[in-house]
Image (spheres, helix red, strand yellow):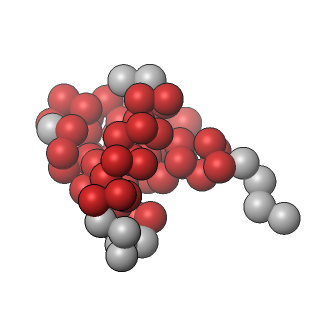
C-alpha cells in the first residue's frame, strides 16, 4: 500500500469517526487493513527507527501516524 492510499484510508476512517483523536483513528485503520498490512506497516516503522524488534500493532499504528503527520507538513 502506498502512502497516498494510506492517506485516503485514514481520511475515510476519520469521516466515519470524527470524534476520535489521530492515534485512535490510526489504530482503527490498522485493524481494518488486516494482519498482512499490519505486519508491513510495523516492518516499515521499525526500519525507519533502525530497530530489529517491536510489538507489531503499536509499531503499525506509529507508522500510520508518521505517514499522516508527514503528509500534513510542518505546523507553524
| As drawn, 23 above or below 64 | below
Q: Is residue 70 left or right of residue 42?
A: right
The image quarter containing residue 24 is: bottom left
Residue sitting at x 55%, y 36%: 48
Percent across and percent down for residue 18 are: 37, 69
Q: Is residue 29 left or right of residue 71?
A: left
Residue sitting at x 77%, y 61%: 75
Name the image quarter holding the N terminus. Answer: top left
Q: Residue furthest right?
A: 76
Percent across and percent down for residue 62 are: 43, 52
| As drawn, 18 above or below 41 | below
Name the image quarter holding the C terminus. Answer: bottom right
Percent across and percent down for residue 64 are: 43, 46
Q: Is residue 42 visible?
A: yes
Q: Is residue 55 visible?
A: no
40 or 32: nearer the eye?
A: 32
Q: Residue furthest front?
A: 15
68 or 45: nearer the eye?
A: 68
Residue sitting at x 42%, y 48%: 11
Residue sitting at x 44%, y 23%: 2
Amino acid at each position: 500500500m502506498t502512502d497516498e492510499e494510506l492517506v485516503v484510508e485514514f481520511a475515510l476512517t476519520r469521516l466515519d469517526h470524527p470524534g476520535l483523536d489521530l492515534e485512535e483513528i490510526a489504530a482503527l485503520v490498522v485493524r481494518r487493513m488486516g494482519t498482512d498490512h499490519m505486519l508491513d506497516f510495523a516492518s516499515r516503522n521499525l526500519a525507519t527507527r533502525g530497530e530489529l524488534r517491536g510489538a507489531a500493532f503499536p509499531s503499525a499504528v506509529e507508522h500510520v501516524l508518521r505517514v499522516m503527520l508527514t503528509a500534513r507538513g510542518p505546523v507553524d
